[in-house]
Image: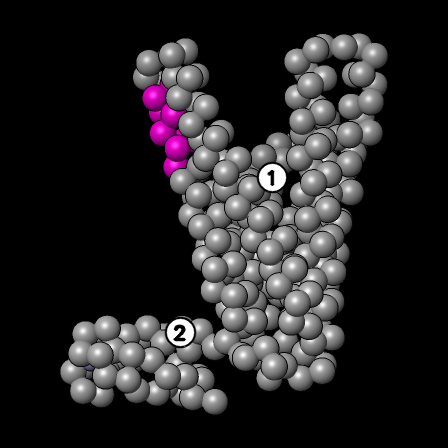
Amino acid sequence: MPISLTCRSCGETYSAPDSAAGRQLPCPICGTENRVPATSVHTTDLTNPERDSLRTVGHGLGLVMLSIAIYVVSVMYIMLVMFTQSFFLLDTLFVVTGLVGFVVPILHMVGMGLCLVVPTRSKAKGMVTTAFVLQLLATLITILTTIAAINRPFQNDPQPFTMIAGLMIIAGLVLFVLFLARTAEFIDRPKISSRAMMSMYLAIATFVLLFLTGMLGAAIGEVALLFGLIPLVVGIIALLRYVGSISQLRSAIREVA
Ligand SMILES: [Zn+2]
C-alpha cells in the first residue's frame, strides 16, 4: 500500500512506495526533500498471525518492565543499607546484588527475546534482534570476567572487558528504544513513539551532563557535588519516560491485538 505524503514546501500531495518509508524523497513538483513517514498499518489490517506475535511482544514488554522494577527497588534498597550502615541489613546485600547481577539481566533478556517475534512488516525486527544479541554477549562477558576474577584475584585486569560489555549494553538499549518507537508507529501510535525517542535523548543528555559535572568537579572541587544532582534528575526523568513508553506500548498492543 503506497504511503501518501504532503510536500512541506509547496503543499503538493504525492505518494511513495512502502520501501521508501522513513527515508527522504524529493517532491515531483518542486524537488524539496520530504521525509516519508514510517509505515503504519491500519490496525484492522493486521493478520491473525501478526496479532498473535504482537501479543507475545506485549508479554515480553511486561517482563522487561518487571526487570526494571526489580532493578530500581534493589538499587534503592542498596542505597538505604549504605546510608544507614546497618550491620543487620548488610547480610541481605548479597541477595540483593545477586538479584541485580543475575535475575534482572536474565529477566530483561527473556523479555527482549519474546519481542523478537515482532511482525516483519513493522521493520522493527532487525533492531530488537541486534539489541538481544548485544545484551546476550554483554551478559556472557560479565559472567566470564566475574568467574575469572574469582579464580585469579589480583592477577588480571577485567576493566577493558567490562567497558566493552558496558558499551554493548548501551548500544543494545538504544536499539531497543528504536524498536519500541518503530513498533509504536507500526500500530499507529506516533505519540508513544516520540515518548520513547525522548527517553533516549534525555538518557544521552544525562551522560553529557555527567561528563560535564565530572570536569567541573575536577576544576572547582566539592561545590560541583550540587551540580551532580542535575544529571541525576535528568536521568530519573529519562528512566520514567522509558518505562512509561514501554507501559503505554504494552496497553496499546492489548487494544489492537
Ligand atoms: Zn513540493
Kindly tell me whether residue 178 is visible in this rendering.
no
Q: Residue 198, position in %: x, y?
A: 44, 50
Kindly tell me whether residue 76 is visible in this rendering.
yes
Question: In the drawing, what numbered circle is on residue 37?
Answer: 2
Q: Residue 22, position in %: x, y?
A: 40, 73
Vertical side of 224 occupied by 8: above or below? below
Q: Residue at x 56, y 71 (%)?
A: 187
Chief secondary structure of the magenta portion: helix
Of residues 32 and 215, the one drawn nearer to the viewer in this rendering: 32
Vertical side of 86 occupied by 177: above or below? below
Q: Would you say the beta carbon of the disc 1 residue lies within 8 angstroms of ligand 1?
A: no
- Asked if residue 216 is among those painted magenta in the image, a careful observer would answer yes
Residue to which mark 1 is pinned: 162
Mark 1 burial class by Cα count in 10 Å: few <14, some 14-19, many 20+: some
Q: Amino acid at mark 1?
A: Thr
Mark 2 burial class by Cα count in 10 Å: few <14, some 14-19, many 20+: some
